[in-house]
């Protein structure tokens, strides 16, 4: 389903104690599949409790460049679920991991 040029990165964070996501999963997770040749996100899913949330978050991330600052702007301006802060933290965690992987892969090529 995914090309050999993609990687999977997961970011995690805590959501508020009264959030159904916390009650179900204990944490908030954001999974991203990224094409390493372009940095473009090709798939996204999170630990939401309803499918609509997953589909909406998918639409915020897919076809975006992983390090595009507009992602955070879109989350802040368009996603008003109770896990908004958790989504931002999980994305930043995934971005940090992506940057570490990118740096390691580019240093292996030199």
Image (cartoon, grey):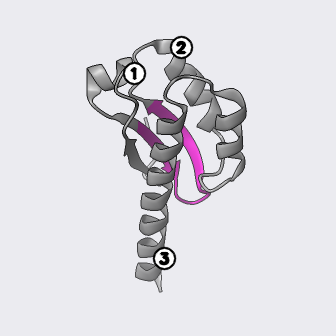
Magenta residues span: 30-45
The numbered dot on residue 52 is 2
Q: Nearer the viewer, mark 1 or mark 3?
A: 1
Asked whether 99 falls inside the magenta stretch, the response is no
Q: Residue at x 43, y 72 (%)?
A: 105
The residue lying toward the viewer, choosing from 44 and 15, is 15
Against 36, residue 50 (above or below) is above
Against 62, residue 103 (above or below) is below
Q: Nearer the viewer, mark 2 or mark 3?
A: 2
Extreme residue toward the bottom, this view: 110
User: Crowding near pointer 2: few (<14 within 10 Å), some, many (20+)?
Assistant: few
Q: Residue at x 42, y 59 (%)?
A: 97
Q: Residue at x 71, y 43 (%)?
A: 73
Residue 79: x, y in percent? Answer: 63, 27
Please give the residue where the numbered disc 1 appears in the rendered image.
Answer: 19
The numbered dot on residue 55 is none
Please give the residue where the numbered disc 3 appears in the rendered image.
Answer: 106
Extreme residue toward the front, this view: 17
Distance from disc 2 to disc 1, alpha carbons, whole Å, reads 16 Å
Q: Earlier in the sequence, mark 1 or mark 3?
A: 1
Q: How many marks?
A: 3
The residue lying toward the viewer, choosing from 110 and 89, is 89
Q: Secondary structure at mark 1?
A: loop
Distance from disc 2 to disc 3, alpha carbons, whole Å, reads 37 Å
């Amino acid at each position: 389903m995914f090309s050999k040029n993609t990687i999977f990165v997961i970011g995690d964070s805590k959501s508020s104690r009264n959030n159904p996501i916390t009650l179900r999963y204990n944490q908030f997770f954001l999974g991203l599949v990224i094409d390493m040749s372009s940095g473009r996100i090709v798939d996204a899913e999170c630990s939401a409790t309803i499918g609509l949330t997953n589909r909406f978050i998918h639409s915020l991330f897919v076809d975006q460049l992983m390090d595009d600052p507009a992602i955070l702007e879109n989350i802040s301006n368009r996603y008003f679920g109770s896990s908004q802060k958790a989504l931002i933290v999980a994305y930043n965690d995934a971005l940090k991991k992506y940057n570490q992987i990118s740096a390691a892969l580019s240093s292996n090529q030199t």
